[in-house]
Image (cartoon, rainbow, N blue to C red):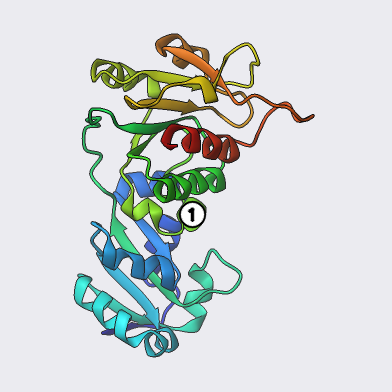
Amino acid sequence: MEKITGKNNDIIKNVKKLLSSSKHRREQNLFVLEGARLVFDVLNSFYEVSCLLMTQSAYDKYKEQADKMVELSRRSFIISQEISEKLSDTKNPQGIFAVCPVKKNDEFLPKSGGKYIALDNIQDPGNLGTIVRTAEALGIDGIIAGGGCDIYNPKALRAAMGSMLRMNVFQYENLCDIIPVMKESGLKVYVSTPDDKALSVTDVDFSSGGVCVIGNEANGVSDSVKKLCDRLITIKMTGRAESLNASAAASVIMWEMLR
């Protein structure tokens, strides 16, 4: 492996920018994974690795898996601890980073009877990552993100704990562009709302599949998306809270969809 010692190396500067800028990620069609668990999750995913960066101590600690990553990667470099700390988005960097090409956003083709979660302008990367992680754990068929947080945001990737690399996650500028495709495939599209006049999610028959839309943390689902959907649904509240956090609401709805 080659060595990089200078903090102003062009590769290092590019990786730092990929970690901090969603605009740069879109322009380069690249994203960065940080930390041993996330980086090694690539070995069990459909993602490729264009560049691998490791400190010598990280390589020595994870040698068996690191050697597999070196074999998978187009280029591999040993970096100094100082560079690792400069790049890191965490308090305690593990000294391992992988730069990966983004997955081609294949056309969303819902399967008959499939169960999907759609996200309308979700802003918080922690919410996004948690929803994707829960979706994989429960067996949801895919996530459709419309606007909002970049699915390759480092915080979203960490919150998803590798699920973002394995789940079918599609990202569009606006859900309004893809809802007609969902409906044409025969899937009913439901909007989650705190409105207690909406149909309780426990009364919805999901046996033929469906899509449930989770809204923005502050404003909920947009009116333009609501107009295209089939039914408003809600999680009936028996306590004092009027609504749930977006990821908590998504978890309850996914459980109901799959039970």
Q: Is residue 169 depicted above or below 92 in this figure? A: above
In this rendering, does residue 11 appear at all?
no
Residue 235 spot, x, y in % from top left: 60, 26
The front one of 110 and 209 is: 209
The front one of 116 and 169 is: 116
- Residue pictured at 39% horizontal, 24% vertical: 175
| Rendering quarter of residue 54 | bottom left
The front one of 61 and 242 is: 242
In this rendering, does residue 240 appear at all?
yes
Residue 32 spot, x, y in % from top left: 38, 60
The front one of 157 and 254 is: 254
Residue 216 spot, x, y in % from top left: 56, 29
Residue labelled with disc 1: 20
| Rendering quarter of residue 64 | bottom left
- Residue pictured at 21% horizontal, 32% vertical: 107
Q: Is residue 133 depicted above or below 194 in this figure? A: below
Q: Secondary structure at mark 1?
A: helix
- Residue pictured at 53% horizontal, 63% vertical: 89
Three-letter amino acid code of the residue under disc 1: Ser
- Residue pictured at 48% horizontal, 40% vertical: 149
Q: Is residue 148 depicted above or below 163 in this figure? A: above
Q: Is residue 29 left or right of residue 193?
A: left
Residue 227 spot, x, y in % from top left: 45, 9
Q: In this view, which residue lies farthest toward the right?
A: 240
